Image: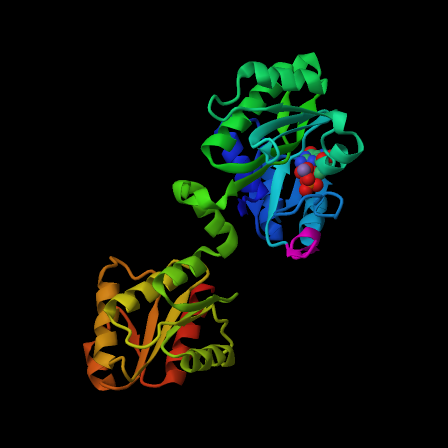
Amino acid sequence: MAMKLHEYQAKQVFADAGIPTPASQLASDVDGAVAAAEEIGYPVAIKAQVQVGGRGKAGGIKLVDDDEEAREAADEILGMDLKGYHVDRVLVEGAVDFTDELYVGITMDRGEGKPVAMVSTKGGVNIEEVAEEDPDAIAREHIDPAFGMHPYQARKAVYDAGVDKAIARDVSSVLTTLYDLWENRDGSDAEINPLMVTADDEVIAADAVMNIDEDALFRQPELAEMEDEAAGGDELEQKADEYGFDYVRLEGNVGIIGNGAGLVMTTLDLVDYYDGEPANFLDVGGGAKAERIANALDMVFSDDNVDSVVFNIFGGITRGDEVAKGINEALEQFDEIPKPVVVRLAGTNWEEGMEILNEDLVTVEQTLEDAVERTVAYAEEVNE
Ligand code: GDP
Ligand code: MN
């Protein structure tokens, strides 16, 4: 199996290796996309980041000339369903003023048991279709992996494809770089379609595909991390996985920490009741010792949306004094508490817990309702 990088990730890998790519920025909301477009300068292309080809034809790529068009396009593309994939991010990228579109790619020729480099002047369209309808339009050069790709092989493929002389050297160099990446990064496919040619004979990778052999991911930690990033989407949700918390990120600004799904849900409902907006669902589970409490605080503190935090712990297996110590220890590490924390303890040893809590660091409330109301009020103060 192969792991597919997103276009923006593949472009980063290509750019790091010296292949020219347009200026670009990733955005996950409309305002971010417009800001990116302004920074890059119009015209820009707004491109859905989903791992399927033919996004252009399917309406996932739009060229825009000003803020208004950018806003409209980003609004349309973000959230769209593209060939079964939900679009939650777009790449905003400087549009290329091009005269030609080439194809360059490296893949494994299973029949020959060797990698093959391919070049075509019929880029910008589905290369499988070109291969079927006009196979001669694709020049191929097999490579002996023991020796790598010789520069003359790259030049030959480029020549055979009929690439214009003025850019032959640059295209050859892109092809050898692509092969080196394929080889060194355990690629299964590496592809640029289109490699655009500009009026002043520059070449630039307008699209990028890089698929990695999954069995080799252990020796490509940097790329494996990209997979996590793409799959997990949210950094915080990844962190929650590491800590072993049940966590869901929500839209609001009131951070919630509790033990037991039912109690956390109740807290969420109460936040809503007091006209606050929950920032997350976070269940630290049973036996919440000091370290888990510190980890939970780290989660909500590192969420930029969070303005205040409510701790709602019911002591059963988790003793109130244990939790209180954990909260104190976690908060003592800060010179300044980043966001106000309100605590309500109940159940086993709750009275001891209340006494242990350092009220210089947290606000203590006796009831769940008071705790939530106070937390919502803190969040409102921040936004006044
Ligand atoms: P794909 O459809 O998913 O392969 O996405 P591409 O990035 O390859 O874009 C599809 C097509 O959009 C390209 O082949 C171009 O013909 C067209 N296009 C026109 N202008 C631009 C531009 O400035 N940038 C990019 N990336 N594509 C453009
Ligand atoms: Mn493409």
Query: Residue 99 sits in which quadrant?
Result: top right
Given residues 138 and 97, the one toward you in this image is: 138
44 within the magenta span = no
Given residues 337 and 53, the one toward you in this image is: 53
- Place of residue 281 in the rendered image (x, y in percent of width and height, measured from the top left): 45, 71
Asked if 142 appears above or below 384 in the picture, the reply is above
Question: Is residue 110 in sight in this rendering?
Answer: yes
Residue in the image at 31% along x and 63% along y: 295
- Marks counted in the figure total 0
Farthest residue, direction right: 133
Residue in the image at 40% along x and 62% along y: 241
Asked if 147 appears above or below 107 in the picture, the reply is above
- Place of residue 358 in the rendered image (x, y in percent of width and height, measured from the top left): 21, 72
Residue in the image at 36% along x and 66% along y: 244
- Place of residue 274 in the rendered image (x, y in percent of width and height, measured from the top left): 48, 79
Q: Which color mode does the image show?
A: rainbow
- Place of residue 159 in the rendered image (x, y in percent of width and height, measured from the top left): 67, 15
Query: Residue 361 sits in which quadrant?
Result: bottom left
Asked if 384 appears above or below 73 in the picture, the reply is below
Query: Residue 160 sits in which quadrant?
Result: top right
**Residue 171 shown left or right of residue 164 in the figure:** left
**Residue 314 shown left or right of residue 108 in the figure:** left
Given residues 93 and 220, the one toward you in this image is: 220
**Residue 331 shown left or right of residue 10 in the figure:** left
Give ligand 1's quarter of the image.
Answer: top right
Q: What is the magenta range?
A: 76-86
Residue in the image at 61% along x and 41% along y: 92
**Residue 359 shown left or right of residue 184 in the figure:** left
Question: Is residue 200 in sight in this rendering?
Answer: no
